Image (cartoon, grey):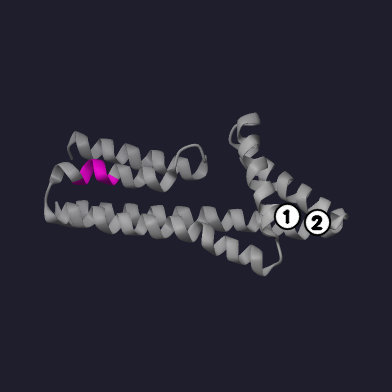
C-alpha cells in the first residue's frame, strides 16, 4: 500500500468523524479521500470507482434530507418549526461545540411548536419527530459513507 492510499484512507476516516461530529462535511470528505486515491491512478477502474462513489454520495446527500423531511411532514411538523430548529442548531453549535447542534435543534423545534400550539405537552410530539428525523438523517449519511468506503476497499482488494 502506497502513501497516497494511506492519505486517502485518513481522509475517509475524517469523513466518518465528520458524520458523527458535524463540523466537517462527512460524505464529501469520504468522496475527497477516494478522489485523492483515484485521480493519480489514472486508469479505468479508478475512474469508474470515483464516478460510482460520486453518484452514491449525491444520492445519499439528497436522501438524508428528503426522507426525514417527508417523515416530519407526514407527521405534521411544520416547516417553520424545522427552520427554527435548524437556525437554533446552527447557533447552538458555536455556543456548545458539537452537542450544541443537537441541543439547539431540539430547543428550536420545541420553542417554535410551543409558540404555535401554546402547550408543552402538545409541542413535545413534534419535537420527538424532529429528533427521529435527525437520527434517520445520520443513519442515511453513515450508511452511504459505509457503502462508498466498502466499494473503494473492494476495488483496492480485488482490482489492485
Q: Residue 113: image x %, image y %?
A: 78, 54
Q: Residue at x 79, y 56 (%)?
A: 124
> In the image, is residue 72 above or below residue 37?
below
Q: Which residue is mark 1?
A: 127
Residue 94 circle label:
none
Whether the residues at callouts 2 and 1 have beta carbons within 8 Å, the answer is: yes
Compared across the picture, whether 118 is left or right of 151 comes to right
Q: Nearer the viewer, residue 51 or 141?
A: 51
In the image as oriented, which residue stretches furthest toward the left?
A: 43
In the image as oriented, which residue stretches furthest toward the front?
A: 80
Write down the quadrant of residue 119 in the picture. Answer: bottom right
Q: Residue at x 38, y 56 (%)?
A: 58
Q: Residue 51: image x %, image y %?
A: 25, 56
Q: Residue at x 35, y 59 (%)?
A: 56
Residue 123 circle label:
2
Is residue 99 visible to the viewer in this orientation of the structure? no
The magenta segment: 34-38
| Disc 2/disc 1 C-alpha distance (Å) | 7 Å
Q: Main secondary structure of the magenta part?
A: helix
Amino acid at each position: 500500500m502506497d502513501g497516497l492510499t494511506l492519505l486517502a484512507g485518513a481522509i475517509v476516516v475524517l469523513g466518518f468523524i465528520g458524520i458523527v461530529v458535524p463540523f466537517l462535511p462527512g460524505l464529501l470528505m469520504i468522496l475527497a479521500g477516494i478522489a485523492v486515491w483515484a485521480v493519480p491512478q489514472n486508469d479505468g477502474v479508478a475512474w469508474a470507482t470515483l464516478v460510482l462513489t460520486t453518484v452514491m454520495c449525491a444520492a445519499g446527500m439528497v436522501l438524508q434530507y428528503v426522507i426525514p423531511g417527508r417523515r416530519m411532514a407526514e407527521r405534521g411538523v411544520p416547516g417553520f418549526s424545522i427552520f427554527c430548529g435548524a437556525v437554533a442548531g446552527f447557533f447552538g453549535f458555536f455556543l456548545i461545540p458539537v452537542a450544541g447542534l443537537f441541543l439547539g435543534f431540539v430547543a428550536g423545534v420545541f420553542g417554535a411548536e410551543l409558540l404555535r400550539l401554546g402547550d408543552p405537552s402538545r409541542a413535545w410530539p413534534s419535537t420527538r419527530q424532529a429528533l427521529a428525523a435527525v437520527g434517520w438523517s445520520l443513519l442515511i449519511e453513515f450508511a452511504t459513507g459505509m457503502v462508498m468506503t466498502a466499494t473503494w476497499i473492494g476495488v483496492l482488494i480485488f482490482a489492485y
